[in-house]
Image (cartoon, rainbow, N blue to C red):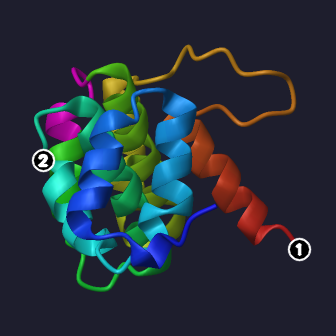
C-alpha cells in the first residue's frame, strides 16, 4: 500500500495532523512513521506539539525508543514530564504518556519504583474497565504484571 521509508518528514507531519480517527492515527504511527528514517526527528518535534493528537504520536515514538533503543534517552526527565503533565492531559495524550510510563517501569528496573509511585499518585486509568483475563492499563498493575511474566519460568 505504501513504502514507509519513502515518505519525507513534511509528508509524515501532514499525514499525522490529518489522521484524526484513533485507529487511522495509530496505524499510521505504528506501521509507517516508526519505519521511517525521520522517526526520531519527528518524535522530538511532536512530543511537545500543542495539538494533543500530534503530541500523542510523539509519545508513541518515545515509548518505542524506551522499549527498543533507550540509549541516549533521559528516562528521569521523561518521568518528570509525565509526572507534571499526564494527570491533566487530554485523553489520547494521557493514554500515550501512560503507556510510556508503564514501559519505563517494565523495561528499566532502576526507574521501576519511581514509575510505580507516579502511577499510584496520579491514579490515571485506575478505574479503566478491563475485561477478565486482560491486564489493566493502570500503570502500577500493568508494570507489576509484565515484570511478573518476564520473570516466570
Question: Extreme front residue here?
Answer: 1
Left or right: 141 in relation to 105: right
Count of numbered tags: 2
Query: How many other residues sit within 10 Å of disc 1, few (<14), some (14-19) or many (≥20)?
Result: few
Q: In the rendered structure, which segment of residues is drawn in magenta?
A: 83-89
- The spot of residue 123 in percent (x, y) is 40, 23
Going 53% across and 72% down the picture, which residue do you hit?
3
Measured along the vertical axis of the image, is residue 102 above or below residue 54?
A: below
Looking at the image, which is closer to me, 46 or 122?
46
- Is residue 85 magenta-colored? yes
Residue at image mark 2 = 48
Looking at the image, which is closer to me, 146 or 86?
86
How far is the residue under mark 2 from the one under mark 1?
A: 41 Å
Looking at the image, which is closer to me, 22 or 149?
22
**Mark 2 vs 1, N-terminal side:** 2
Going 16% across and 46% down the picture, which residue do you hit?
81
- Is residue 118 magenta-colored? no
- The spot of residue 108 in percent (x, y) is 44, 70
Residue at image mark 1 = 153
Viewport quadrant of the N terminus = bottom right
- The spot of residue 74 in percent (x, y) is 20, 71
- Name the mark on residue 101: none
Which image quarter: residue 42?
Answer: bottom left
Going 42% across and 77% down the picture, which residue do you hit?
6
- The spot of residue 114 in percent (x, y) is 32, 52
- Residue 72 visible in the shown view: yes
Secondary structure beneath dot 2 equals loop
Left or right: 35 in relation to 90: right
Amino acid at each position: 500500500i505504501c513504502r514507509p521509508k519513502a515518505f519525507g518528514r513534511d509528508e509524515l507531519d501532514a499525514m499525522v495532523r490529518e489522521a484524526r480517527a484513533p485507529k487511522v492515527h495509530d496505524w499510521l504511527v505504528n506501521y509507517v512513521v516508526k519505519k521511517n528514517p525521520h522517526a526520531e526527528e519527528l518524535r522530538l518535534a511532536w512530543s511537545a506539539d500543542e495539538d494533543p493528537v500530534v503530541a500523542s504520536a510523539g509519545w508513541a515514538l518515545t515509548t518505542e525508543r524506551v522499549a527498543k533503543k533507550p540509549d541516549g534517552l533521559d528516562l528521569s526527565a521523561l518521568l518528570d514530564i509525565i509526572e507534571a503533565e499526564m494527570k491533566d492531559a487530554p485523553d489520547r495524550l494521557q493514554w500515550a504518556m501512560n503507556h510510556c510510563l508503564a514501559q519505563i517501569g517494565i523495561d528499566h528496573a532502576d526507574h521501576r519504583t519511581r514509575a510505580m509511585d507516579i502511577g499510584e499518585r496520579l491514579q490515571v486509568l485506575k478505574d479503566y474497565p478491563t475485561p477478565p483475563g486482560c491486564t489493566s492499563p493502570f500503570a502500577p498493575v500493568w508494570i507489576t504484571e509484565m515484570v511478573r511474566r518476564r520473570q516466570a519460568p
